[in-house]
Amino acid sequence: MTTSVTVRELAKMIDHSLLHPTMTDAQIAAGCHLARQYDVATACVKPYAIAMAREILAGSSVGVCPVIAFPHGNSTTAVKVAEAEAAARAGGSEIDAVVNNGKVLGGDWAYVRDEVRAINAVVRAHGAILKVIFENDYLEDSHIIRLCEICSEVGVAFVKTSTGYGFVKQPDGSYNYKGATDHHLRLMRQHCPPSIQIKAAGGVRTLDDLLRVRALGVTRVGATATKSMLDEAARRLVSSSAVE
């Protein structure tokens, strides 16, 4: 059974990702203009680009979403907290912070909990919300479930599947990643209360991908294929205001 959704509703599911390490200021600016044109949820930027993004997006309904300890999550807790506070003070309305996956894999759950709690507290104190980035390609289901439990206990706004840069060495020696899989999205939705939203990142590249993860309970995606997805949604209008 399909459910009708408007193009605007789909646009407001998207954090337009401008995070590739080679992106120049001109490319980030162009991406912010695209985010504004398509009226997405946020433009997801590196912390140094917050001011530029805010200037381009001023007067629109598109937020600025900086990333913290991206992509590996290995900064100290104090540095992550300081970076998150600076990003919120600079105008980041949504903060995406990467967990310390070495601590996750080592089972140091007290460290992980304390870090998530500290980042969430400083972000909320400055009127922003926190999305906690796992890196599901590195993790077993048991790790993902425990992270969901910790994030639920702390009361963060979102849990997020991946950075999109969590490359894992494959048996043939190449590096690749799966990103947001249906299995992991179902697992995260199952182990978080309705108050915590799910963000899918990595592998959501087509409109059908977007509609599929939406049906699994995802309310936000990180995407670089924003234009093609939303242009396709407009082409597939089944009425004046809905897509299936």
Image (tube, grey):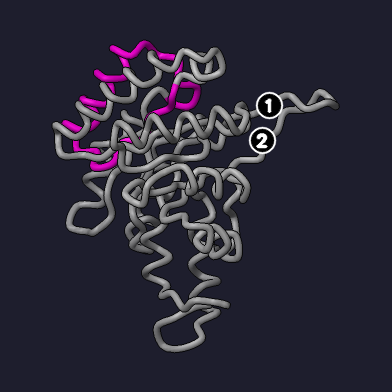
Q: Residue at x 42, y 40 (%)?
A: 159
- Name the outermost residue toward the right: 172
Q: Which residue is mark 1?
A: 168
Q: Residue at x 47, y 42 (%)?
A: 191
Q: Residue at x 37, y 33 (%)?
A: 151
Residue 197, image x, y percentages: 38, 49
Residue 206, image x, y percentages: 60, 60
In depth, the one of 52 and 3 nearer the eye is 3
Badge 1 vs badge 2, beta-carbon distance below 8 Å: yes
Q: Which contiguous range is marked in magenta?
A: 70-99
Q: How many marks?
A: 2
Residue 154, image x, y percentages: 29, 31
Label whose residue precedes the other's in the sequence (1 or 2): 1
Residue 87 is inside the magenta segment: yes
In depth, the one of 107 and 52 nearer the eye is 107
Q: Is residue 208 placed above or below 120 in the rendered structure?
A: below
Q: Which residue is mark 2?
A: 177
